[in-house]
Amino acid sequence: MAAAYHPKGSVIAALDIGSSKIACFIGRVRDDGGNIDVIGLGHQASHGIKSGTVIDLDSAESAIRQAVHAAEKMASDVTKGYPLREVIVNVPGIHTQSKLMSMGVQIMGEAVTDNDIRRALAKAQDQAIGHDVELIHTIPTAYRIDGHEGIREPRGLFGQHLDVDVHMVTGSMGPLRNMASCIQSSHLDITALCSAPYASGLACLVEDEMDMGCVVVDMGGGTTSIAVFYGKELIYTDAIPVGGQHVTNDIAKGLTTSVHSAERMKALYGSAIATATDDKDLIDVHPLGEEDHIQPNHVPRSYLVSIIAPRLEETLELVRARLNDSGLGPIAGRRVVLTGGASQMPGLRELAQKYLEKQVRLGRPIRMPGLADAVSGPAFSTTAGLLHYVIERGDEMPAEIMANVEAGNMWQRVKMWLRENW
């Protein structure tokens, strides 16, 4: 199925609401192939968000407004100062759940069409919709015709019965409503939702990684999210409530210093793996509550590393456990891509290779050339990926599927009429 069409010159906006930062990218479709130029960007330290959850509506709304305003101001030459009205928004992995199901439809000896696939997806959506969840993605991952496996492209093939394996991603209604309230208070409408690790994978992965099997580990400030790709589709997503801010808090407690000083030390001197010179390298720690820091308070860098490493090891062990519990090990491949702001810790790649027993590389938004250096790193993978999603994979939006499905025969038409009218 083709993604939703965005004509040349269309302006689209992505809003990434994270625990440590809020970022907004405004993009313009360059040509009919869906290539995007980023014409506006803004980012702001996050407030009112903790571990991917809104905890203060007013603070979160203010931070969103500032990030959006900065992006609008930068894009004003193209947009003629017209304010943003619609955005695509990320859903933190901690609030999503994966569900795999298989759904079949009769094709009565005819060739499989887009609409046959949509009918199967619509039936799956009917079963997945609940009062306490919002359906975010409906992704066909595999097909069978009359029981024959291994079909990647069923369109045009003939048979009696089509089965579609479907990956449904749902979001918890409560946290989503709180997030939507902040966005709508900023006079913005949400046109689409996308799971954060899915967006990161779309920005960071090359085609072969998506096809052969790859795990994306998106390490944010408050959460670490997981996305597994295979056959060019997202087949699993999960998250754990541990991220870079937990490392910062560990440093602040372990060295009795402020969170601000702990974050600075982590960025300047932090490492996931100890080195031979760590005992000789001294770091000056600003003691908590002392305004006049006259006397130096030196600690060896090895002590800082001894605080950081256990938290990162715990995080990677939790990721490994989630992957093992998913049962997707054989098809998840031997490749891991680390991304997200907390993935930039020196030595983390080597530590991840040890704990996950896979080849590991650091991922950044490689599929969006021309980004400014300040926003081209792993911390902005989700933001860039949201633009890719709405351009390339808009057909996975549940509302898009329901809007375009057509009844396949008279009985289907009767059932659809009943559902729509009663």
Image (cartoon, rainbow, N blue to C red):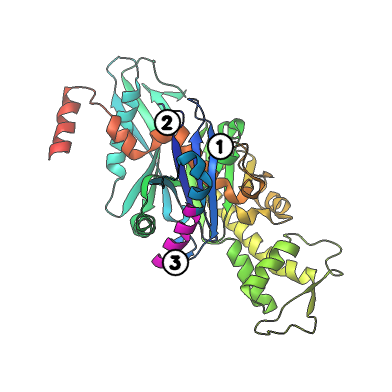
Question: For mark 2, what is the residue?
Answer: 6
Tell me which residue sits at (46%, 57%) in the image.
64
Q: Is label 1 or label 3 in front?
A: 3
Using the image, determine if residue 184 lies above or below residue 416: below
Q: Nearer the viewer, residue 339 or 237?
A: 339
Quarter residue 269 falls in: bottom right
Q: Nearer the viewer, residue 172 or 45?
A: 45
Res. 24 in view? no
Residue 260 in the image, given as x and y percentages of width and height: 63, 71
SS for callout 3? helix
Res. 83 in view? yes
- Is residue 390 toward the left or the right of residue 276 in the image? left
- Is residue 241 toward the left or the right of residue 336 in the image? left
Using the image, determine if residue 260 lies above or below residue 7: below
Tell me where the magenta segment starts and ends, as one range: 55-69
Q: Quadrant of the C terminus?
A: top left
Q: Nearer the viewer, residue 70 or 21?
A: 70
> Which numbered dot is residue 59?
3
Question: For mark 1, what is the residue?
Answer: 331
Q: Amino acid at mark 2?
A: His
Residue 261 in the image, given as x and y percentages of width and height: 67, 72
> Of marks 2 and 3, which one's residue comes earlier in the chain?
2
> Of marks 1 and 3, which one's residue comes earlier in the chain?
3
Q: CA distance from mark 2 to mark 3?
A: 34 Å
